Amino acid sequence: MKKTILTFGLISGGISAVMMLLTLPFVDKIGFDKGEVLGYTLIVVSALFIFFGVRSYRENAGGGKITFGRGFAVGILITLIANFCYVATWEVLYFKFMPDFGDKYAAYAVEKAKKSGASPEKIQQTERQMAQFTQEYKSFPVNVGYTFLEVFPIGLVVTLISAALLRRKIAPQPA
């Protein structure tokens, strides 16, 4: 179980980390909206390795059978390893190379509120929220928490789907 979890967790985490490293320099050129779509698309692609990991465990370690609970356990552990890789990559990028990211994102959010035709009160509320976000985001533990929560729900959903689709109580009989 450990080998499968480590292998697929590191593959998934490696893909998401490399994709982040390759795409983040272009955020200023493509904008935050397109950057979010691209980023989450790449996270979903890397999360597909959760499915492949659960399937590999079922076929190799489980002898062709796996319960939902065991599939969930394998998938969530793969998710946690992948998330660790993603979060570690972001923390290095943010604190060493992009400490102004929070300020840029806050400015983007306020500008988006203005362009949407929001009321002056709503714009002020967005400005206050973004000022608070920017201050909180500079804290390492808060930054780690936000970053973890950015990707974990995707891994959780893929884990639940994988465990449900791949569960098999009886090993297939050879033909």
Image (tube, rainbow, N blue to C red):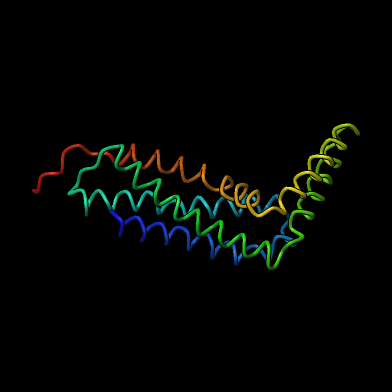
Left or right of 152: which side holds 114? right
- Which residue is drawn at the image coordinates 65% and 48% (left, top)? 142
Outermost residue on the left side: it is 175
> Is 167 situated above or below 100?
above
Q: Position of residue 1 (x, y in %)?
A: 28, 53
Outermost residue on the right side: it is 120
Q: Position of residue 89 (x, y in %)?
A: 57, 62
- Which residue is drawn at the image coordinates 60% and 67% (left, top)? 22
Left or right of 113: which side holds 99? left
Total labels drawn: 0
> Is 6 situated above or below 65?
below
Closer to us: 5 or 36: 5
Left or right of 50: which side holds 56? left
Quarter of the image for residue 87 reads bottom right
Q: Position of residue 24 (x, y in %)?
A: 65, 62
Closer to us: 108 or 90: 90
- Which residue is drawn at the image coordinates 54% and 65% (left, top)? 18
Q: Position of residue 149 (x, y in %)?
A: 57, 45
- Which residue is drawn at the image coordinates 77% and 49% (left, top)? 135
> Is 27 situated above or below 148?
below
